Image (tube, rainbow, N blue to C red):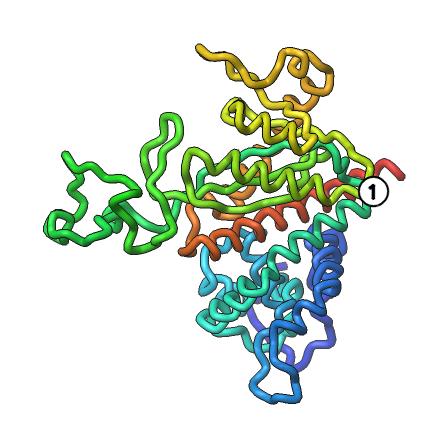
Amino acid sequence: MRGADTFTESLFTMRHLDDFVPLDHPLRMIRVMVNKALANMDNLFGQMYAADIKGGRPSIAPEKLLRAMLIQVLYSVRSERQLMEQTQYNLLFRWFIGLAMDDAVWVPTVFSKNRERLIEHDAVIEFFNQIVQQAQEQELLSGEHFSVDGTLIQAWAGHKSFVRKDRTDDDGNANAGNFKDQKRSNDTHESTTDGDARLYRKGKTASELRFMGHTLTDNRHGLVVSAVVTQADGYAEREAAKAMINDARQALPGDEPITITLGADKGYDAKEFIEALQEMNVLPHVAQNKSGRQSAVTDAIADSEGYAISQQKRKLIEQGFGWAKTVGHMRQVLVRGIKKVDQMFVLTMAGYNLTRLRSLGQIRLQGQA
């Protein structure tokens, strides 16, 4: 019997928003971890806003703001405007963010403006650290064996915006896009669209306006324990690596010196970098670069069993970069300025960790069953 093509809408509904989300939906476990992290950030959120006694119009709740930014990463929503549009009719988004069915969705410009407050108080960095802390509590981190790498992030700026700093006439509008026979460098030129971006090329890639993202991962499960964005240059990877591994070393419990390991590719095989690691009591499990030169990593280290394991485990770091660039839209950022790019990169890596923690949790439950 053919059904009738009719639509009858009830005046009232007796169902909760939670009823529309399947019990086995991946976001359920992620939302539990997110809410736990946000609850631990309550004191920070209290410092971000004026006291209630002073009055004023309530802003977007920072917890809802962070959950909305996270859903944008997890579902590859390309802009705040599209995020607000989809939140209007997507019950799953409303449930995750914490909006009731009847709640009004924010204006995109208000949503974007409130993100500035998160940058000012490093709220995204604290959220990332809270997720890492949960991984530590679940004993999913070794805390002693790490890998480091960097990746190029294309800026939201084109070659036509890269003009001379003194704004001489030879780069005027008449010659826009014509770079033939012109010598351009970061010393003499800058982007009018994003002044923090730098013209940079690596390997066989073309020169583009870029940033550089860096991550430090724990070798046990490939979880990201530190992430940062810097300007792109030939020294950024090693400088960022030294800062991140030094932070990881200081986070170790106890006062007894513990030797930790750091795996990396051939690009980190530099005498200055290896010596800096050894001064920090970090064993350099860096891939040897013997292409017409002598490696700074000794053969005694390279022949060890731990070195071979580190070289195998360090490839896990590429999974985070791949996820960030395909799912998290970090191949080319849609924000400008190094602070905003850093915020999106750190939040994206927090999203990657959440998906990994959810998967690892499922594996653990299956093992117990």
Task: Work out whether residue 232 can be spotted.
Answer: yes
Q: Residue at x 73, y 72 (%)?
A: 15
Q: In this picture, is 93 found above or below 146?
A: below
Which residue is more in the foreground, 347 or 225? 225
Which residue is more in the foreground, 93 or 243? 243
Q: SS class of the residue under badge 1?
A: loop
Q: How crowded is mark 1: few (under 14 residues within 10 Å), some or many (20 or more)?
A: few
User: Which quarter of the figure is the C terminus placed in?
Assistant: top right
Q: Measuring from the top left, give residue 312's x and y in whole percent.
A: 65, 22
Query: In the picture provided, is 129 more to the left or to the right than 362?
Result: left
Which residue is more in the foreground, 18 or 162? 162
Q: Which residue lies furthest to the front in this view?
A: 279
Query: In the picture provided, is 55 more to the left or to the right than 139?
Result: left
Q: Measuring from the top left, give residue 244's x and y in whole percent.
A: 61, 41
Query: In the picture provided, is 48 more to the left or to the right than 15?
Result: left
Name the residue type under label 1: Gly
Q: Which residue lies furthest to the right in this view?
A: 369
Q: Which residue is drawn at 45% across and 38% down?
A: 152
Q: Measuring from the top left, give residue 101's x and y in whole percent.
A: 63, 74
Q: In this picture, is 142 found above or below 338?
A: above
Q: Measuring from the top left, give residue 362's x and y in whole percent.
A: 78, 42
The residue that mark 1 highlights is 254
User: Which quarter of the figure is the N terminus placed in?
Assistant: bottom right
